[in-house]
Image (tube, helix red, strand yellow):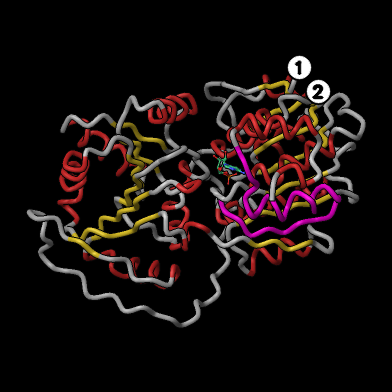
Amino acid sequence: MSFDSLGLPEELLRAVKEQGYTKPSPIQEQAIPVILSGKDVMAAAQTGTGKTAGFTLPLLANLMKGERAKANQVRVLILTPTRELAAQIHESVCNYGQNLPLRSAVVFGGVKINPQMQLLRRGVDVLVATPGRLLDLYQQNAVRFKQLEVLVLDEADRMLDMGFIHDIKRIIKFLPEKRQNLLFSATFSNDIRKLAKGLVNDPVEISVSPRNTTAESVTQFIYEVDKTKKSPLLSTLIKENKWKQVLVFSKTKHGANRLVKQLEGRGILSAAIHGNKSQAARTRALASFKEGKITVLVATDIAARGIDIDQLEQVVNFDLPHVSEDYVHRIGRTGRAGNKGEAISLVCEDEFKLLKDIEKLIKKIIPRKVQPGFEPGTPLPPSVLDSREAKPKKPKKPRVEHKDGQRTGANNGARQSRVRSNFVGK
Ligand code: AMP
């Protein structure tokens, strides 16, 4: 199938061509016609499947028809859990909408609120936002939803994990009842289905296989190693294999900082990206990594969520994640768009239980290696695949303060400001 047969207008087809996409991804094939028709959608799709274009393209096409946004009004609201994801979605909106006379903006916490208020004054056709900051803006009368046509919840599972459920419910109350709803989530847990019940009307359900659990393009294996040897082992692997660009996941912010210091001490250029870093520092680190100025980017799960780096070949789990689904998200950073990728986990004795949970989730045993000179004191027990059904997860309590520092109180956003305001098109 080609993009031409999906019913998109010529302005958008031109923009898609300019991105170099030759054919729609499975989620795009399924979602674009349905969203164009105005129906509600519930889609199981992760980052890496092309879902952003899957909803952005038809939404922009529909926006071309209606009346432009008036002062402080928003026509399409896209809610996302993290600033990085918000910024990336907005970038996609700008790229795909480059030939259209529509206006878009992105707002998130951790930066000054005033410039965002000014930005919204003229009204925007598309607003990408994190929930906490959107509520602050709403309370200050900076944003209105009379003209709202569509609500998109992206990475809904992650939003619930991060404790945004109450914020989301409050936001929904402000919106006109008659609207199109699109819900995207990597997984469809009971909690998500509960949220969906009060949100989507007679939705078309779309599911594309989570390509990173099945993708043959990602080679996965683990190195058995003692905890204290992980950092020297990582340096050895980077040097021996001459890795040029490695995304390393660390469980904690502190651990990420420590690892960067150790790697730099061994002459490996590195930076960390997590919630205690300012937005400017995070943006800078990501840019240096993308441009190849540093070899290693050490990230916590939340900070890395949605990071999109073309042709990233190497992902390393310095620690195994406590939430098994995060493993799938982590390795999904590599092996995109048919490129090959490798995901390596450094696993010590205490992490065996986490490894078992991950293997159960992905329904396969990850092959193991031991690097000569790094033999573990106590080898890991052998893995046996547990095929019993997982118990439903207990709902998590909402957190007041999010790990990535997105919401630090009723009036977040006193820190350094960098707001993207973009005109889509001329
Ligand atoms: P997403 O799942 O939206 O985060 O997109 C993942 C990556 O796939 C992004 O780098 C997109 O630019 C890219 N992409 C989206 N659609 C296509 C397509 N039809 N062909 C090739 N690459 C695509």
Q: Is residue 131 visible?
A: no
Q: Nearer the viewer, residue 388 or 11?
A: 11
Instruction: Write down which quadrant ligand 1 falls in.
Output: top right
Q: Which element is circle 1 on?
A: loop
Q: Amino acid at mark 1?
A: Lys
Residue 11 lies in the magenta-colored region: no
Which comes before the other along the chain, label 2 or label 1? Answer: 2
Across and down, in percent, residue 327 comes to 42, 57
Instruction: Answer with left or right where residue 398 lies relative to residue 144.
Output: left
How far is disc 2 from disc 1 in space, using C-alphas? 6 Å
Give the residue number, with chain letter if any, for mark 2.
101
Q: Is mark 1 within 8 Å of ligand 1?
A: no
Q: Which element is circle 2 on?
A: loop
Q: Nearer the viewer, residue 332 or 138?
A: 332
Where are the magenta residues, as a range?
21-46
Residue 28 lies in the magenta-colored region: yes
Give the residue number, with chain letter if any, for mark 1.
426
Q: Residue furthest top?
A: 426
Image disc number at residue 40: none
Q: 10 Å neighbourhood of mark 1: few (<14), some, or many (≥20)?
A: few
Q: What residue sits 69% from the left and 36% below the top?
A: 128
Circles 2, 1 touching at the beta carbon (< 8 Å): yes
Give the answer, above or below, for where 251 lies relative to 210. Answer: above
Q: Quadrant of residue 294?
A: top left
Q: Residue furthest left?
A: 373
Q: Is residue 269 visible?
A: yes
Instruction: Answer with left or right where residue 142 lies relative to residue 395.
Output: right
Q: Residue furthest bottom?
A: 388
Instruction: Answer with left or right where residue 42 lies relative to residue 316.
Output: right
